[in-house]
Amino acid sequence: MLALTHALLSTTLTALVTGKAEPMVLAIAACASQLPDIDITTSYVGRIFFPIARVLELRFPHRTITHSFLGTAIVAVLGLPILFYSSVWYQALVLGFAFGWLGDTFTKSGAAAFYPGRARLVIPRNVDYRLATGSPAEYGVMVVLVIAFVIVININSSGGITYNFTQLVGHTQGAAQTYLEQRDNYLVFAKVKGHHLITGKPIEGRFEVIDREGEQLVLKTDQGLLKTGEHLEPSSIKTQKGARVEVETLTLNLLQESPEEVLLSVADQMSSRTYVFGELEVEYAEDLVLPKPAQSYATIRASTGVGVNSVTLSNASPAAVGKLLGDYDCTGTLLIRIVKVINE
């Protein structure tokens, strides 16, 4: 099998398995696909690494140890340092090597996949359908691989197979998974068709997704925050990737302090997309009344006790926290999620 065929096969299958389209990942897979032929000095990689190739050529027959699962395991072990730098690069190395020699199992002589066993793996059994190196059939395979490569790279560049499938189906569970994967790098929007579960009014539009709770999404709409499955029943929901973002999280511990004052101390780090989470105990707050919106998402919820209120904050704005709890001393922990659009 020609070196180009090895490279096309390995890069296409590696991209398919990893779901990646980055040039470095593809380059590593392409280079790794040539490594199995390091057992002969006449190959491209054998000429580059001639001393190693010469030793292997004298010790092992062609397409034995370097074209086997044992050889793949050795490469996986030797490549472990790469894993500490990038797991995807490591996957590309191992997969590129494995797919490289697996391609040779479709040639007339096959490969000793189970080395040190002597049996050779040859696919298919009928010798007339096996590939001869440089034959018209191999060039036909190249054309098919080029087409497959273009298709896979386009799918990966647009979000991957899972993303494209969930977009086609328009299901909330898939949209929630997509949001989870993209939220730390991009704004995520949801194109929704559905109706309000309480009012029954139709809802249709493109809304920013600000959080995921279980398999449901919290959306920022002109009716306030709405949670799918609780306020909004979508018949179709498809995610769209927005601008790139940087996400920062802050943890603030309060001990009988005003949440408003604590939040003001870090106001210079906040953005227009700042969300407050946490659990607070509010002292002597029998008169504390928090809104309980029936038709939208409650960002601040409280259960009244004797002398103390336990308050839960979820996706609350700093302004809302300050307005409702600014006059009370609170104890607990706040988690601040700050989303900043790059170059905004």
Image: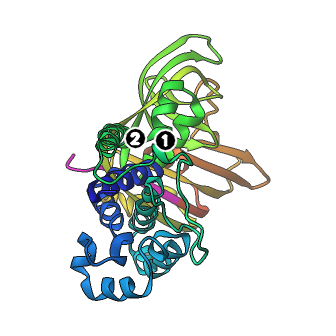
Residue placed farthest to the front in the image?
128
Q: Is residue 81 shown above or below 192?
A: below
Q: Is residue 137 shown above or below 329?
A: above
**Residue 98 - label:** none
Position of 337 compared to 27: left or right? right
Where is residue 264? Give x, y as percent.
39, 58
The one nearer the camera, 131 or 196, is 131
Position of 145 compared to 329: left or right? left
Disc 2 element? loop
The residue at the point 20 percent across, 49 percent down is 343
Where is residue 147? Give x, y as percent.
31, 37
Which residue corresponds to mark 2? Answer: 159
Which residue corresponds to mark 1? Answer: 178
Q: Is residue 54 shown above or below 338?
A: below
Q: Is residue 166 magenta?
A: no
Could you tell me the amino acid type at mark 1?
Thr
The residue at the point 33 percent across, 76 percent down is 40
Which label's residue is closer to the chain start, 2 or 1? 2
Labels 2 & 1 near each other (Cβ < 8 A) = yes
Q: Nearer the viewer, mark 2 or mark 1?
A: 2
Could you tell me the amino acid type at mark 2?
Gly
Q: Is residue 342 magenta?
A: yes
The residue at the point 52 percent across, 45 percent down is 315
Looking at the image, can residue 318 be seen? no
Q: What main secondary structure does the magenta stretch of the protein show? A: strand
Span colored in magenta: 335-344
